[in-house]
Amino acid sequence: MKKPPVVTRAVERGLSPFRGQRAAHVLPRARLGGPMPWVIAIMVALTVIAAGGGLALGNLADRARGDLAGSATVQIVEADDRDRERQAASAVTLLLNEPVVTEVRRVPPEEVEALIEPWLGSGTASEAVPIPALIDLRLRTDASEQALQVLSDRLVEVAPDARIDAQSDWLAPVLGALSSLKWMAFALIALLSFTGAAAVWLAARNALGSNRDTIEIVHLLGGSDNQIARIFQRSILLDALVGGLLGLLVGGLGVWLLGAQFAALDSALVAGGGLAAVDWLVLVTVPLVAMGIAVYTARMTVLSSLRRML
Amino acid sequence: MSAPEGEIVQFDNVGLRYGTEREILSNVSFTLFSSRFYFLTGASGAGKTSLLRLLYLAQRPSRGAIRMFGTDVITLPREKLPAYRRRMGVVFQDFRLVGHLSAFDNVALPLRVSGVREADLRGPVEDMLEWVGLAQRADARPATLSGGEQQRVAIARAVIGRPDILVADEPTGNVDPEMALKLLRLFEALNRLGTTVVVATHDVQLLRKVPDSLIMRLDKGTLADPTGALRYPPRRDGVRM
């Protein structure tokens, strides 16, 4: 019998890295594979769409709030054309001299007719229905409700049929609804994150079960929990990378198409709901966060299961 | 506290039970010394495999103390166990080769787990496969190997890391007498290099083939005569063969 080969005692017996391709080779079925990249892709796509919607709604609400905070509209509701014009002219003269008002614009009758055209049709509106005269105001940002009331009182003195509306008042419920939608989108993101983590948890447990024998052997050969967990982490990282990129692509395309459709509405309100460069950057981080959640969940699942083995 | 010179494993009143069943192992106490060759014998169901599982740290006992290399391994945190397992080589009764890995990869596994670089492990693994006569089957999967070949791959895997202790559970149970003797010579050769060898077997004929070996006999979960059993030939009044 030949002497056995002398394997050098210098072989590392400390806890050295056992990772990468050669470690994954030991547990090929640890590759969570199968539907996992698709599950992650769907989660990321939905999250990107929800996040895109939430950010757009937030931008829309902020923009509208900013625009409307210093705006007011004066309506002069008088059936008689000449009296209405006289009152409008007096009101403009008064408003131009008010310190709380920074900008006054008499809305041209054509513009007013265009506003009501969808409801009353074109051409006949001003003949059939008396249309109020409209004056748009930009107020100083520090104009209080009290200042607005004082202005209203003075206005009534020169134009008895004038009525002043702060635009923020009538848009407040809309802004509240937008804000709710935004928070609902963020709640949806949290829910999707939780669901994604649960899917990874199930898949990791399943993979652990199907690789139990090999894991036990690796354990008995001196493999540590961290070494085994890293194999699973690497596997889920690859799945999450593929799924995340795919999800980002689909979700990003969805957000872009929706944005383009809303932009085509040519509505002043919707125009403020676009995504800024920083928002797109936030969307790009969604798959990165998804990868982090997936890897962390897989690691915790594997480590907690391994702790039950010796 | 370090172990006395030469003592590498101490079992002290070790007991093992599953759930509320009666103990599979009771009051097991013995000491293993470095560079010695031990046989663990006993009838089927005597508890040999359970004792070996405790020895290669696959299980914790229900009671008693186990010290290895001077350390109490019962209370050792689990993250420190791998370092002790790496000092052991185990030949399982059912080989437990990784089915989807080649013979080469199975033998290389302990070195890879220990973090040996690919460039450094190729030579030792090829030498080891040649030593067990499987150099030509390096790429074969376990399913395509015969029982004897699988056994030799399992042995090569167990000894590739030059363990301080080699534990083999019925290593000759699945091979013909000629191959059994050949495997035993492999263990002896390794033992001469300084590795403590513990072979569990119910084949009493095998015991006579390693003259310098010490024998432990398990009977219904207890060591029949621990003191007498650790001699060869066994004392007439201690261990019945």
Image (cartoon, coloured by chain):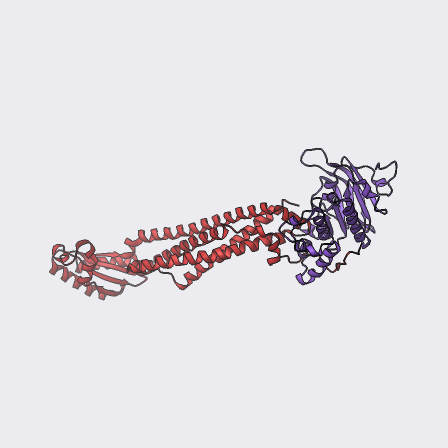
Chain colours: A red, B purple
The image shows residue A237 at horizontal and vertical percentages of: 53, 56
Q: Nearer the viewer, residue A29 or A46?
A: A29
For the N terminus of chain A, the image quarter is bottom right
The part of the image, by quadrant, that contains residue A278 is: bottom left
In the rendered structure, the answer to whether residue B24 lies left or right of residue B5 reads: left
Q: Nearer the viewer, residue A243 or A43?
A: A243
Q: Nearer the viewer, residue B188 or A244?
A: B188
The image shows residue A200 at horizontal and vertical percentages of: 52, 49
Identify which residue is drawn at 71% across, 54% down. Answer: B134
Is residue A32 in view from this perspective?
A: yes
Is residue B1 in view from this perspective?
A: no
Residue A90 to residue B74: above or below: below
The image shows residue A307 at horizontal and vertical percentages of: 63, 46
Q: Nearer the viewer, residue A117 or A162?
A: A117
The image shows residue A10 at horizontal and vertical percentages of: 74, 60
For the C terminus of chain A, the image quarter is top right
In the rendered structure, the answer to whether residue A103 lies left or right of residue B104 reads: left
Q: How many marks?
A: 0
